[in-house]
Structure formats: C-alpha cells, structure tokens
C-alpha cells in the first residue's frame, strides 16, 4: 500500500458541557456525547490508552452573551477541562481547544455583531484573549476557527506578548461555509440565530481562493494549516499539499461522520471498511493528520 493510516494520524474532537451531571448523547452524532467534567476525564484517558495522540475540545457554556465572554473566562468550561487534563495526561496527549466564540455568543456567530453584520476587526481582540486563556489553562496548541481576516497574526502577536512564543497555532485556513456542519451545530449549540456564515467562511465553489487563504495564514504565523471539511474537498487538500510544505490537517466533519453512521445502522454499507477507506483517502489526498469523530472507534 502506498498510503498508511495509523492511530497517530488522528485527533479526537470532544464536547464538554457546563452544568450537566451525566453525559448527554448527541442524537445526530451516534456514539458522541456532550461530556461532563468527570466523563471527559475518563474519555481522554481511554483515548490516551488507545494511542490517540491528540484531542481538541469544544465547550458548551451555561451562559451566553453578545460577545461570547465565557470563551476567555479563566474558569470557563474549556479552561477548567484543560487544567484537569493537563494534570492527568502530562505530555502523553496533545491538548487543543477550538478557538472561536460561536458556542459562546447568544447569536451563534463567530464574532461581534455590529449593524447586523459580523465586525471582523472588533472580533480579533476577543479571539486573542481566548487564545491566551487556553494556553494559560494548559493547551499545547491554539486552533483558531473563526475565519476572521487577520486572526492568526493577532493571536500570534498576543501569545508572543504573553511569553508563549513556542506555542504553535493551527489555523483553520480553508474553512468552507458547508452544509456538512449541521450535526456539530446541534452538539455545540452554535447554530446562528440569524443569517449564515457565508460572509466569512469560504464559498464551496472556490479552490483557488483556498490557496490564498492558506498562504495568508502561513504568512501570519500559522504553524499548521487545515482544510475543512475533508471529503468534499479532497481536491483542495491535494492542491494545498502540492503547493505548501507546512503540516496539513483535514477535518472529517460531523455531517460526513453522521452519514456513514446512518447508512451503517441501516445495513446499507460495510461501516468499518468505508470508515477506513474514507480516512485513508484523506491521507492519500495529502493530509498529515485528521480530526475525526471516528478516532476512538478506528483506534
């Protein structure tokens, strides 16, 4: 075989929710739950024992406001979870937290709203604050996903100013305005209350633009770049691999996972073979590693 898929190619996305006493199953993501602080501890330990080298956390706070201020609360749901995990796993698992405010805003958008629109520049400072709070809580890497122009530079400068020059940035560089995010938005409670995200996420019709977005993130200081989603954007992954030498991630997103799970539950497909085929294809296209809800099962 020309392409290898291994456990160490995977990153497990995990949800942690404030104010619940038991893990809450996500109906649209079979096998995925919103974790409590305690159940998240158990899950990360299980992933570590399986050899999964990294996790990325998504927080669901009890309170939301127009700015998403819980995103940078030092005692917020993700910050507490990072501190818990840092003490337990040491260097065995790379800890990341998704860096956006959409789960924390009462309107569900990825930045500050001014006159009915997302204000790109006003949102940058909020993302920088969140990045610093994640690192202070124990994150090994920051992962900005808001698709605000200039976010990587602002975050990189802020981390450097706080003495975190060695903390890498994984930029969601080519993140498309995709219908494949539907199940995630249910899990994270981040569906926009008005409009959509097409003013700041990418048009699914565009591939050349993706190269400009990735090039921009690299110029601003991103250490890793990402294409999201993966399955419908294999050509973009391939173009990025051929053009850039940076480490390249791909996000096998919620809708891609849920379609496989639904068809598998109906007995219409061989779920195991198809899952491995999809992930191998993403690697074959050029991704160095894959964020996937299949990570634990595959491992």
Image (cartoon, rainbow, N blue to C red):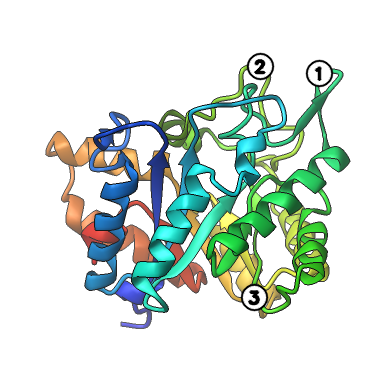
> Quadrant location of the C terminus?
bottom left
Say what secondary structure mark 1 lies in.
loop
Q: Quick check: 140 left or right of 277?
A: right
Q: Which residue: 12% across, 39% down?
A: 267
Spatial CA span between label 3 and label 1: 39 Å
Disc 2 designates what residue?
A: 194
- Where does residue 279 sit, x and y in percent of width and height? 36, 62
At 43% from the left edge and 28% from the top edge, which residue is drawn? Answer: 186
Question: Looking at the picture, how far across and down is residue 76, in whole percent?
Answer: 53, 43
Q: Earlier in the sequence, mark 3 or mark 1?
A: 1
Quadrant of the image for the N terminus?
bottom left
Circle 1 Cα neighbour tier, 10 Å, few/some/many (<14 / 14–19 / ≥20): few
> Which label is found at residue 178?
none
Residue 268 location, quadrant = top left
Mark 2 neighbour class, 10 Å CA radius: few under 14, some 14 to 19, many 20 or more:
few
Q: Position of residue 2 (x, y in %)?
A: 37, 83
Q: Are marks 1 and 2 in contact (CB under 8 Å)?
A: yes
The mark lying in front, picked from 3 and 1, is 1
Residue 221: image location, x then y, percent: 77, 70
User: Where residue 242 is drawn, which disc sits there?
Assistant: 3
Q: Is residue 141 shown above or below 119?
A: below
Say if 199 sits above or below 6 in the image: above
Asked whether the beta carbons under mark 2 and mark 3 sit within 8 Å of each other, the answer is: no
Q: Which residue is label 1 attached to?
A: 116
Q: Residue furthest front?
A: 75
């Amino acid at each position: 075989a020309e392409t290898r898929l291994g456990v160490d190619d995977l990153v497990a996305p995990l949800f942690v929710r404030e104010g619940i006493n038991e893990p809450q199953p996500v109906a649209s993501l079979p096998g995925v739950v919103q974790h409590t602080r305690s159940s998240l501890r158990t899950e990360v330990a299980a992933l570590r024992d399986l050899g999964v080298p990294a996790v990325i956390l998504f927080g669901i706070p009890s309170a939301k406001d127009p700015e998403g201020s819980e995103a940078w609360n030092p005692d917020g749901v993700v910050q507490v979870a990072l501190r818990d995990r840092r003490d337990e796993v040491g260097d065995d698992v790379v800890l990341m937290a998704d860096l956006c405010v959409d789960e924390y805003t009462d309107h569900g958008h990825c930045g500050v709203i001014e006159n009915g629109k997302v204000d790109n520049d006003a949102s940058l400072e909020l993302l920088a604050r969140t990045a610093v709070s994640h690192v202070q809580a124990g994150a090994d890497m920051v992962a900005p996903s808001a698709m605000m122009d200039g976010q990587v530079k602002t975050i990189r400068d802020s981390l450097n100013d706080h003495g975190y020059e060695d903390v890498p940035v994984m930029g969601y560089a080519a993140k498309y305005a995709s219908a494949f995010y539907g199940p995630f938005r249910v899990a994270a409670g981040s569906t926009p209350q008005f409009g959509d995200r097409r003013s700041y996420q990418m048009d699914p019709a565009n591939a050349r633009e993706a190269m400009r977005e990735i090039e921009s993130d690299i110029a601003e200081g991103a250490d890793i770049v990402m294409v999201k989603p993966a399955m419908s954007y294999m050509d973009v992954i391939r173009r990025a691999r051929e053009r850039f030498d940076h480490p390249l991630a791909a996000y096998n997103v919620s809708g891609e996972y849920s379609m496989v799970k639904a068809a598998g539950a109906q007995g219409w497909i061989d779920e195991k073979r198809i899952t491995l085929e999809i992930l191998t294809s993403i690697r074959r296209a050029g991704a160095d590693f894959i964020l996937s809800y299949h990570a634990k099962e595959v491992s």
